[in-house]
């Protein structure tokens, strides 16, 4: 009986921990660029595709050129967003 109660209690604790985590659903490269710019951190969105991210204090074009895989793969989606410290770019490739 004690093990059943303990299992139920642990399942409630696990559910509460899961509910406390913020969930960010990123659908487009523009969404990902905006999220990075707001947070001020370069991070891959985990879109399940080839994705390059870049940053520049100079211009959006420079941030794009600094993205991973730039010049090595064919882009299918390119987006930039302005953050407090500079430009953030997300490039998704075929």
Image (cartoon, rainbow, N blue to C red):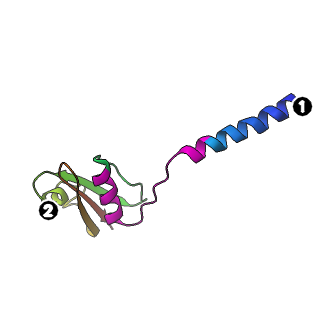
Residue pointed to by mark 2: 61
Corner quadrant of residue 74? bottom left
Residue closest to the eye, 73 or 16: 16
Corner quadrant of residue 49? bottom left
Determine if the magenta segment contains residue 61: no
Residue pointed to by mark 1: 1
First reached walking from the N terminus: tag 2 or tag 1? 1
Residue closest to the eye, 75 or 26: 26
Residue closest to the eye, 47 or 31: 31
| SS class, disc 2 | helix
Which numbered mark, 2 or 1, is in the foreground of this view?
A: 1
> Is disc 1 surrounded by few (<14), some (14 to 19) or many (20+) residues within 10 Å?
few
Span shown in magenta: 17-38
Q: Is residue 80 above or below residue 12?
A: below
Residue 61 in view of the camera: yes
Classify residue 60 as left or right of residue 16: left
Q: Residue at x 16, y 58 (%)?
A: 65
- Determine the CA span between mark 2 and mark 1: 64 Å
Q: Is residue 2 above or below residue 43?
A: above
| Magenta highlight: main SS | helix
- How many numbered marks, from 0 up? 2
Q: Position of residue 41 (x, y in %)?
A: 29, 46
Q: Residue at x 27, y 47 (%)?
A: 40
Q: Furthest-top residue in view? A: 2
Q: Furthest-right residue in view? A: 1
């Amino acid at each position: 009986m004690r093990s059943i109660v303990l299992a139920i209690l642990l399942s409630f604790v696990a559910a509460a921990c899961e509910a406390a985590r913020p969930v960010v659903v990123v659908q487009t490269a523009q969404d990902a660029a905006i999220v990075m710019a707001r947070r001020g951190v370069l991070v891959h969105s985990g879109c399940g595709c080839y994705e390059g991210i870049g940053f520049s204090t100079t211009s959006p074009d420079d941030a794009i050129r600094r993205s991973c895989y730039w010049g090595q793969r064919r882009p299918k989606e390119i987006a930039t967003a302005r953050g407090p410290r500079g430009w953030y770019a997300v490039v998704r490739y075929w």
